[in-house]
């Protein structure tokens, strides 16, 4: 089979002679690029390529840890261990302090708690977003450091 520039009619007649399909590969090119091949096989290979690319992309997992504004030392250490495990696994961490009822007056305690957590996890992850109050939650995001 010859490789070259053909008119649409000539290309279609060549494809018919061989018993294959004329497939437009890149329509935006000038002139459009077409190939003579089996269309079903072309679609199968295209899906296979897309699936391989999709498998290579990594999914971002976000794990959450919830604190109260008056979380005591033991609970803090327990939750910090879980946070360390999440960051070692490569997941992002969303830590938040939930203020119930009138405990919203302890905003400073919540901020201090989250900043302390960020400082304790400094060697495993970096802070993506500093503590921000959103409604009744104060949230901080910590991403794992690259290995």
Image: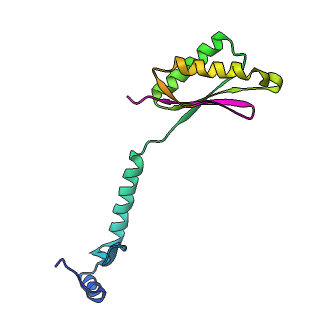
59 shown above or below 38: above
Where does residue 77 sit, x and y in percent of width and height? 59, 13
Query: At 36% across and 74% down in the image, what residue appears?
Result: 27
Q: Report the colour scheme.
A: rainbow
Give the camera-side residue of 55 and 136. Answer: 136
User: Percent from the top left, x then y, of residue 120?
Assistant: 53, 17
Split into 4 quadrants, where in the image is the N terminus? Answer: bottom left
> Foreground: 107 or 124?
107
Q: Is residue 128 above or below residue 37?
A: above
- At 32% across and 77% down in the image, what residue appears? 32
As drawn, the residue found furthest toward the left would be 2
Magenta stretch holds residue 86 = no
Residue 68 visible in the current orientation? no
Residue 77 in sight: yes
- Give the dominant element type of the magenta stretch: helix, strand or loop: strand
Residue 39 is left or right of residue 72, and the answer is left
- Queried whether the magenta region covers residue 137, the answer comes back as yes
Residue closest to the eye, 19 or 86: 86
**Number of marks present in the image shown:** 0
Work out which quarter of the rendered image holds the C terminus and state it: top left
The furthest residue to the top? 73
Figure check: 145 above or below 12: above
Give percent across and percent down for residue 67: 67, 22
Quadrant for residue 75, please give it. top right
Is residue 114 left or right of 32 when viewed as pictured?
A: right
Rendered position, 39 above or below 142: below
The quadrant in which residue 131 appears is top right
Residue 88, image x, y percentages: 46, 25
Task: Tell me what residue is drawn at x 34 percent, y 75 percent.
Answer: 24
Quarter holding residue 98: top right
Where does the magenta region start and end? 130-147
């Amino acid at each position: 089979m010859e490789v070259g520039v053909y008119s649409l009619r000539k290309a279609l007649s060549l494809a018919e002679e061989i018993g294959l399909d004329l497939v437009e590969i890149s329509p935006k090119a000038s002139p459009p690029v077409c190939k003579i091949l089996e269309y079903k096989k072309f679609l199968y290979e295209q899906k296979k390529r897309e699936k391989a690319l999709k498998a290579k992309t990594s999914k971002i997992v976000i794990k959450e840890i919830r604190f109260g504004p008056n979380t005591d030392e033991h609970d803090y250490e327990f939750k910090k261990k879980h946070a360390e495990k999440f960051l070692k696994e490569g997941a992002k961490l969303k830590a938040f302090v939930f203020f119930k009822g009138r405990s919203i007056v302890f905003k400073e305690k919540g901020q201090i708690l989250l900043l302390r957590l960020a400082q304790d996890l400094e060697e495993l992850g970096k802070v993506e977003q500093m503590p921000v109050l959103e409604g009744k939650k104060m949230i901080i995001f910590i991403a794992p450091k690259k290995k």
